[in-house]
Amino acid sequence: MTTTDFAGQTALVTGGTSGIGREVALQLGAGGAHVVVTGRDAERGAATVRSIVEAGGSADFVAVDLAEAAAVSHLADEASRLGGGHVDVLVNNAGMFPFGPTAEVDVETFDAVMAVNVRAPFTLVAALAPAMADRGHGAIVNVSTMVASFGMSGMSLYGSSKAALQLLTKAWAAEFAPAGVRVNAVSPGPTRTEGTAGMGDGLDALAATTPAGRVSTPTEIANAVVFLASAAASNVHGVILPVDGGRLAV
């Protein structure tokens, strides 16, 4: 991509202060977009914005708890305001990923995961996609997971929430493509981020089940997200793009 691929566009990246989301935000900023970064940690948010600005881009940080419905609706309004009245790229990256037996999941955890992983993207798309459609262009990229496509012990809650997001990706593609809005998703495999650090050797063991046999980097996932958001994917709609070392191929 050139440094002007996203010039004049506003991009909203949820969970953009660390890991995959931060790398997506940095790449979109380098591509010329004004990036609205969200997260719960103001210090990490400020650091991400600073990195984008120091590289020659522009960005703002909005602190938000995506588990709160009213906060998500406010985020959509605030992102539009910060973007000069428009959001052209939406990256639904933020997610909760608790692992463990189904019988140990309590109601509070279930509700929180579904709120962040499903309701928040749904709310943001409902708020922002119609305006994209009115303008005749826009790109939405959802970040899913390989365990949304096959069963794995301990992944029932996380996998099912992301499976819902994958179906929404296809439904939204069918709904908004006629108006020029592209909706796609990236399905990462094991990726080394701050969020997966607690998995320890388990992350490498999971990666060993893939043909490539290694853990992905946030940059590798972000490359796919930014591709789908860019004009290089101008007629790509409703795709779930695996970046998982070939796990879904076997």
Image: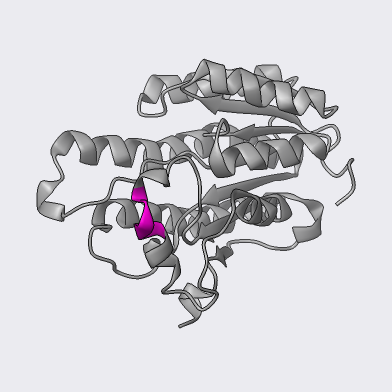
Q: Is residue 241 above or below residue 179?
A: below
* In this rendering, position of residue 199 left or right of residue 78: left
Q: Quadrant of residue 208?
A: bottom left
Which residue corresponds to the image point at 54% horizontal and 49% vertical from the top-left?
142
Residue 118 in the image: state x and y as whole percent: 39, 43
Residue 203 visible somewhere in the drawing = yes
Numbered-mark total? 0
Residue 202 part of the magenta-drawn span: yes
Residue at the limit of the structure toward the front, as seen here: 201
Which residue corresponds to the image point at 56% horizontal and 56% vertical from the top-left?
185
Residue 192 in the image: state x and y as whole percent: 50, 51
Between 197 and 167, the residue placed more toward the observer is 197
Which residue corresponds to the image point at 74% horizontal and 44% vertical from the top-left?
137
Q: Quadrant of residue 129?
A: top right
Between 94 and 70, the residue placed more toward the observer is 94
* In this rendering, position of residue 208 left or right of residue 185: left
Region of the chain picked out in magenta, as a range: 199-203
Residue 23 in the image: state x and y as whole percent: 65, 41
Label the magenta part by its dominant secondary structure: helix
- Placement of the C terminus among the 4 image quadrants: bottom left
Residue 77 visible somewhere in the drawing = no
Q: Is residue 208 above or below residue 20?
A: below
Q: Is residue 217 above or below residue 76?
A: below
Which residue corresponds to the image point at 40% horizontal and 20% vertical from the top-left?
70
Residue 13 in the image: state x and y as whole percent: 60, 35
Between 155 and 245, the residue placed more toward the observer is 245
